[in-house]
Image (cartoon, rainbow, N blue to C red):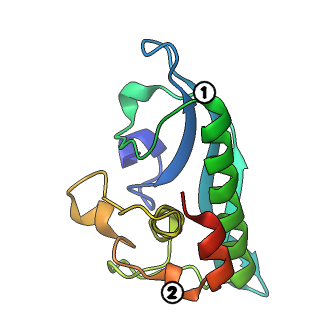
Amino acid sequence: MGTERTGNPECPYHSFLMLVDETDLENPVVLDELHFIARQHNSHPFLQAVTKRADRDFSKLNMRGYIGGHEEHMREFWERGLDVAAEISSLQVPFSKAAGEKAINCRAGVKAVIEAMGMDFEPVLDNPGAMIGARSNLISQLPAEVLENARI
């Protein structure tokens, strides 16, 4: 989502993952969303995963599909991603205020989940603002057993 979509000039782009039912391609339905936010702890923001469901206007989003399939398989993959996100949250990695490509932010969390599941992360937009966190390496901080269980 861009600034005009978020309404927040401090956060020009936000990355998150969605589980979407695309049975009806004309009217896809968001079943769940995984976001990484800055959560305060002892006066310091750290990366925290949160899930929620929202009605989305897909025409206002830039999206990249990673995996697709039948609901029973997709739910299993989604749960694996949520397990990775919970592990990332437990690390309490400081949320970056810096804007570099190795920053720890929403995109870094999304990237780590995608990579932990054995896929290659690809930025949705080719724009400097959308590259913040795109070269982070959170996956290196995850235990081997979490990575092993996450692979699809």
Q: Is residue 143 above or below residue 15?
A: below
SS state under label 2: helix
Quadrant where the N terminus lies?
Answer: top left
Q: Residues within 10 Å of mark 1 (few under 14, many from 20)?
A: few
Q: Is residue 114 left or right of residue 93?
A: left
Return the residue nearer the eye: 30 or 106.
Answer: 30
Residue under the point 39% across and 73% down: 133
Mark earlier in primary sequence (1, 2): 1
Q: Is residue 87 above or below residue 26?
A: below
Quadrant where the C terminus lies?
Answer: bottom right
- The image shows residue 143 at horizontal and vertical percentages of 65, 85
Residue under the point 47% across and 52% down: 8
Instruction: Find disc 2 in the rendering and name its residue.
Output: 140
Return the residue nearer the eye: 96 or 86.
Answer: 86
Q: Is residue 75 visible?
A: yes
Return the residue nearer the eye: 19 or 34.
Answer: 19
